[in-house]
């Protein structure tokens, strides 16, 4: 029988709460932890397939050593560490620390290995450090340097309500002719349903949308303190209407595009509840802007 355990995601710096079901030491299911005060059940597409990555048939379970003919053989960790250490020491003895450099990636999270590599750099006497920050992150670091005087002062982007001045509700973009055909109203509320879930979203008329297609922004549905001891959720949690088995055939990441949905206007009671929740989000956003 599966046992559910609380943990958290390390695939980015937000560290959303997770619940994982385990059987025989393996993760069999993953869901958002609704008891987590920060994320309150939110789960993006990355951790939804943790078990797929962890148990993939091509996952390496032992170190591999290259043979002279180019093939590989499995070896023990003790053997791998011993041989690697011997080669590194030989290079350092002949060429010094200048022969080494640390190369890091540009991901948002997964920095657990950085501590070990920085310690190894210091032991080897290496002075060079290279990274592969994407263009997006390179610009981010540059802006941080201009704002705070140090490019290493890395701020954590988020989707706080105050940062969503133009669209605090995460509205559903839809062509005006489709709004009319569905009997809905611009600025009203619409139910968006799939075989896995249902969301109530604000409606925003957008003539640039193709008829029959709609768009919902990703990154909403986070939980924030409202300043009075309560919490708010800013917009729709898109992952609630995606399916883990409707996914990319290679990466197994659940599709967030080209998802079939059913749209319907909501009844008055549900619309009133959605409007009340959205009003709280707007009030928090306004308070943050005023304080700034």
Image (spheres, rainbow, N blue to C red):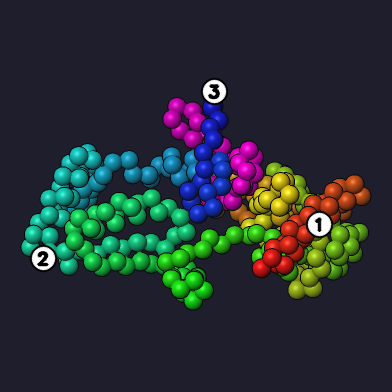
* Residue position marked by numbered label 2 in the rendering: 95
Does residue 20 belong to the magenta stretch? Answer: yes
Q: Quadrant of residue 292?
A: bottom right
Q: Give the number of the mark in front: 1 or 3.
A: 1
Q: Pinpoint residue 211: horizontal percent, then vertical percent.
A: 79, 67
Does residue 117 belong to the magenta stretch? Answer: no
Quadrant of the frame with the N terminus: top right
Q: Pinpoint residue 85: horizontal percent, then vertical percent.
A: 16, 50
| Magenta residues (range) | 19-47
Q: Is residue 201 left or right of residue 130?
A: right
Mark-to-mark CA distance, 3 and 2: 57 Å
Q: Secondary structure at mark 2?
A: helix
* Residue position marked by numbered label 3 in the rendering: 1
Q: Residues within 10 Å of mark 2 (few under 14, many from 20)?
A: few
Q: Pinpoint residue 28: horizontal percent, then vertical percent.
A: 52, 34
Q: Tell which residue pokes out farthest to the bottom in this image.
A: 146
Q: Pinpoint residue 36: horizontal percent, then vertical percent.
A: 61, 41
Q: Secondary structure at mark 3?
A: loop
On screen, residue 69 above or below 139? above
- Name the residue located 73 percent from the left edge and 58 percent from the top edge: 284
**Viewer-side residue, 143 vs 54:** 143
């Amino acid at each position: 029988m599966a046992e559910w355990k609380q943990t958290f995601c390390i695939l980015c710096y937000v560290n959303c709460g997770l619940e994982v079901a385990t059987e025989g030491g393996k993760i069999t299911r993953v869901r958002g932890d609704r008891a987590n005060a920060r994320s309150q059940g939110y789960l993006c597409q990355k951790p939804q397939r943790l078990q797929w990555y962890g148990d993939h048939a091509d996952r390496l379970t032992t170190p591999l050593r290259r043979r002279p003919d180019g093939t590989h053989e499995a070896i023990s960790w003790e053997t791998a560490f011993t041989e690697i250490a011997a080669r590194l020491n030989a290079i350092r003895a002949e060429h010094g620390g200048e022969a080494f450099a640390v190369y890091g990636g540009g991901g948002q999270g997964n920095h657990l290995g950085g501590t070990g590599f920085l310690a190894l750099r210091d032991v080897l006497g290496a002075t060079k450090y290279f990274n592969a920050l994407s263009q997006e992150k390179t610009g981010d670091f540059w802006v941080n340097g201009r704002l705070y005087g140090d490019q290493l002062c890395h701020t954590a982007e988020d989707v706080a309500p105050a940062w969503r001045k133009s669209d605090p509700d995460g509205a559903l973009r839809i062509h005006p002719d489709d709004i009319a055909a569905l009997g809905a109203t611009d600025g009203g509320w619409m139910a968006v349903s799939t075989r896995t879930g249902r969301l109530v979203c604000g409606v925003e008329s957008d003539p640039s949308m193709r008829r029959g297609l709609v768009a919902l922004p990703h990154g909403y549905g986070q939980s924030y303190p409202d300043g009075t001891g309560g919490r708010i959720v800013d917009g729709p949690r898109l992952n609630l209407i995606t399916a883990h088995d409707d996914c990319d055939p290679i990466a197994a990441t659940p599709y967030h595009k080209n998802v079939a949905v059913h749209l319907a206007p909501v009844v008055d009671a549900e619309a009133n509840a959605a409007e009340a929740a959205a009003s709280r989000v707007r009030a928090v956003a306004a308070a943050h802007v005023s304080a700034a």
